[in-house]
């Protein structure tokens, strides 16, 4: 059983997969750090915001974030958060991406992650714990990515503008506004933005607004207030939310509350 422990104390173990469970108070901040192993960080309860030099990821309850080995990141807890972290030797999942991503977690993997943190740490190859870890490896390799990321461009000027936007997001910002501020043509801006982030400006802006909205909604702020603050009318905000996450804000929050 490994609970309320630091990963650094266990990363040198010979087992290719180890699991640790922790609980954190609201507002807790893990300052920038990195792990030698890759990590699947699962939020059993509460919401997490993970940041790196390359973007921001929001992790609601019953979702997880994949963090590749040696990627420096910080984590902010919104609400009381219970995590289940699984750490993998870098060669254990060679086909996983070399960037962070938020993923959905189904019932089977949820049960496996909950069970894993209560297993003996020094499990043998043929032990029950070893089979559970092997099944976790299999499940993690097939997880679907969720659009809960705000990637930052490598270009310094674009990245600065993106960080400024994330600090005060608004649906009213346009391509023309950004292109003018950056002294770029509209065509040059749109081409560079998609190349640097993998998203169109409109899709990026919507995901940034969504990432900004979710912590506030999870904290109990009214949907209408959050929508208006972000420059949406409530109906258009609900449409955007449903299009990206597949549920209305109220339905999504109700599901998260049952996690």
Image (cartoon, rainbow, N blue to C red):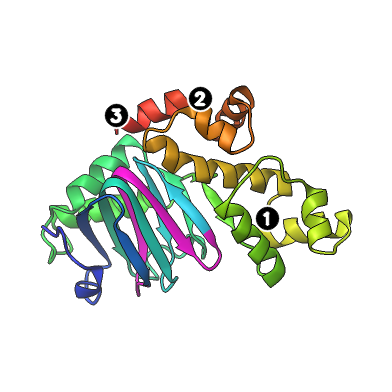
Badge number at residue 198: 1
- From the image, tell me which residue sits under label 2: 248
Q: Dot 3: few (<14), some (14–19), or many (≥20) neighbours within 10 Å?
A: few
At a point 64% along the width and 43% down the height, the residue shown is 170
Drawn side of residue 176 relative to residue 15, left or right: right
**Does residue 33 lie above or below 249 as drawn?**
below
Q: Do the residues labelled 1 and 2 touch (CB within 8 Å)?
A: no
Tell me the crowding category of disc 2: few under 14, some 14 to 19, or many 20 or more residues within 10 angstroms, Cα based. some
Please provide the residue range marked out in magenta: 34-55
Residue 73 in magenta? no
Q: Position of residue 220 (x, y in %)?
A: 37, 33
Name the secondary structure under disc 1: loop
- Residue 44 part of the magenta segment: yes
* Comparing labels 1 and 2, the label whose residue is closer to the camera: 2
Q: How far apart are marks 3 and 2 (CA)?
A: 16 Å
Percent across and percent down for residue 186 are 87, 54
Mark 3 and mark 2 in contact? Answer it, CB < 8 Å. no
Cα separation, mark 3 vs mark 1, equals 33 Å
| Residue 57 % position (x, y) | 48, 53
Which quadrant does the C terminus fall into? top left
Establish if 127 lies above or below 235: below
Residue 155 seen in this snapshot: no
| Residue at the image point whose x is 29% and y is 50% from the top | 135
Mark 1 to mark 2 CA distance (whole Å): 26 Å
Whole-percent x, y for residue 251 in the image: 43, 23
Total labels drawn = 3
Classed neighbour count for the residue bearing mark 1: other residues with Cα under 10 Å, few (<14), some (14–19), many (≥20): some
Q: The N terminus lies in which quarter of the figure?
A: bottom left
Vertical arrangement, residue 95 with respect to residue 112, above or below: below
Task: Name the residue tied to disc 3.
Answer: 258
Q: Which of marks 1 and 2 is nearer the N terminus?
A: 1
């Amino acid at each position: 059983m490994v609970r309320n422990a630091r990963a650094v104390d266990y990363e040198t173990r010979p087992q290719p997969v180890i699991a640790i469970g922790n609980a954190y108070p609201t507002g807790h901040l893990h300052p920038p750090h990195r792990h030698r192993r890759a990590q699947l960080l699962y939020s059993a309860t509460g919401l997490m915001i993970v940041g790196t030099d390359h973007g921001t990821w929001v992790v609601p309850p019953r979702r997880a974030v994949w963090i590749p080995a040696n990627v420096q990141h910080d984590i902010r807890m919104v609400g009381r958060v219970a995590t289940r972290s699984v750490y993998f030797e870098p060669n254990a999942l060679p086909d996983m991406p070399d960037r962070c991503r938020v993923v959905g977690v189904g019932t089977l993997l949820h049960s496996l992650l909950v069970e894993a943190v209560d297993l003996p740490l020094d499990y043998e190859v043929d032990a029950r714990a070893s089979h559970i870890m092997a099944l976790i490896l299999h499940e993690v390799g097939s997880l679907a990515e969720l659009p809960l990321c705000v990637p930052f461009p490598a270009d310094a000027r674009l990245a600065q503008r993106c960080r400024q936007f994330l600090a005060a997001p608004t649906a009213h910002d346009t391509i023309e506004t950004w292109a003018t501020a950056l002294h770029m043509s509209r065509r040059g801006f749109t081409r560079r933005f998609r190349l640097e982030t993998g998203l169109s400006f409109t899709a990026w802006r919507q995901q940034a607004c969504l990432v900004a909205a979710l912590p506030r909604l999870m904290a109990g702020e009214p949907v209408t207030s959050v929508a208006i603050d972000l420059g949406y009318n409530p109906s258009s905000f609900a449409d955007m939310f449903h299009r990206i996450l597949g549920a209305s804000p109220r339905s999504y929050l109700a599901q998260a509350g049952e996690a």
